[in-house]
Amino acid sequence: MALHPAAKLILEQMEVSGAPAMSTLTPEEARISTDISMLAGVPEEVAKVEETLIPGPAGEIPVRIYTPEGQGPFPALVYYHGGGWVIGNLDVVDVPCRQLANRTGCVVISVDYRLAPEHPFPAPAEDAYAAVEWVAENGDSICVDSSRIAVAGDSAGGNLAAVVCLMAKDKEGPKISYQILFYPVTEHSYDTISYHENAEGYFLTKDSMVWFWNHYLQEESGEHPYASPLRAKDVSGLPPALVVTAEYDPLRDEGEAYAKKLFDAGVGVTLKRYEGLIHGFVWMSGVLPQGVEAIELAAEELQGIF
């Protein structure tokens, strides 16, 4: 399908802005210069939003907690933002987290995990897992039923959500009921068809992904399944999943390959490719209505589970 007109306009405006390529920046410069909040739309009102600190493996982890209207205890949805494990924060996913809280009826716990290169692999994954453990052990304090926990994330956050499910299985940790993976990173490799087709010109580039991976892994190998969940030997028994991909995204094929790996292992999977769209579209629901559609699809899936 042709590139969606709104996505095409976004890309044209980005090109006209003359912003330097991500791969030419330092992490500090990238964190300052990357701002697509104007594409997110107006934040929805949520019954309650609060920020707190929870214990992590190397100090406290900031989280933002979104509580919907209604009588609790509610299911919990632990959310991990994207940004290649190097950039991103709670604010960049504020709009989708509000949308998720309102549509799923879950308390959404958005996690500000440590970032590379200051905190390379496996630090972000360890923080991500610690957040699920905290929710499982402290549900009463946030009006959550700790027997109903799901995880979600976009891009590198989708990677972390998938990895947390693997870790919970390996460690016999908290029971996770569902995983929502928006265009996830699943493999430290750049040789898929979608990488060749969408290497540049569609927001996320191959050069940017190389930059992200190099900062994240540093001296570590990308073969570890907690870095590349697609390389996990056994994914049977993992939580059912929703995997969302975008046609014009270098990560399209690895996300769909992970969905197939789960399906082949007997895990329930819903796979949805959004034709004509680019990486990051869930962050861009102010101009791309398909971002809200993906949130609503996730809500339908969670309502079926919970």
Image: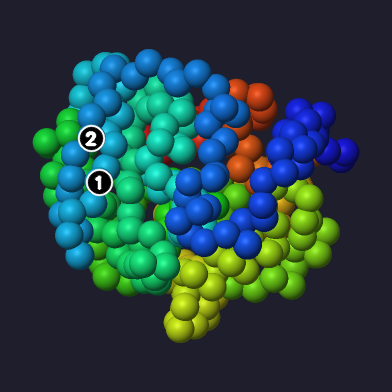
Left or right of 211 in this view: 28: left
> Vertically, is 198 above or below 245?
below
- Residue annotated with mark 1: 62
In the image, farthest residue toward the right? 2
The amino acid pointed to by label 2 is Glu
Of 252 and 148, nearer the camera is 252
Q: Is there a contact, CB below 8 Å, between mark 1 and mark 2?
A: yes
Left or right of 34 in this view: 120: left
Q: Can you say which quadrant of the picture contains the C terminus?
A: top left
Disc 1: CA contacts within 10 A as few (<14), some (14-19) or many (>=20) = many
> Vertically, is 60 above or below 148?
below
Task: Kindly identify the residue that appears in the image at 27 percent across and 26 percent down.
Answer: 49
* Residue 18 position by quadrant: top right
Residue 265 is situated, as x and y percent measured from the top left of the image, at: 54, 66
Task: Kindly identify the residue that appears in the image at 47 percent across and 32 percent down.
Answer: 96
Residue 40 is situated, as x and y percent measured from the top left of the image, at: 55, 28
Task: Kindly identify the residue that appears in the image at 11 percent across and 36 percent down.
Answer: 141
Left or right of 139 in this view: 212: right
**Count of residue discs:** 2
Q: Can you say which quadrant of the picture contains the N terminus?
A: top right
| Residue 11 in sight | no
The amino acid pointed to by label 1 is Pro
| Residue 18 in sight | yes
Left or right of 21 in this view: 98: left
- Residue annotated with mark 2: 51
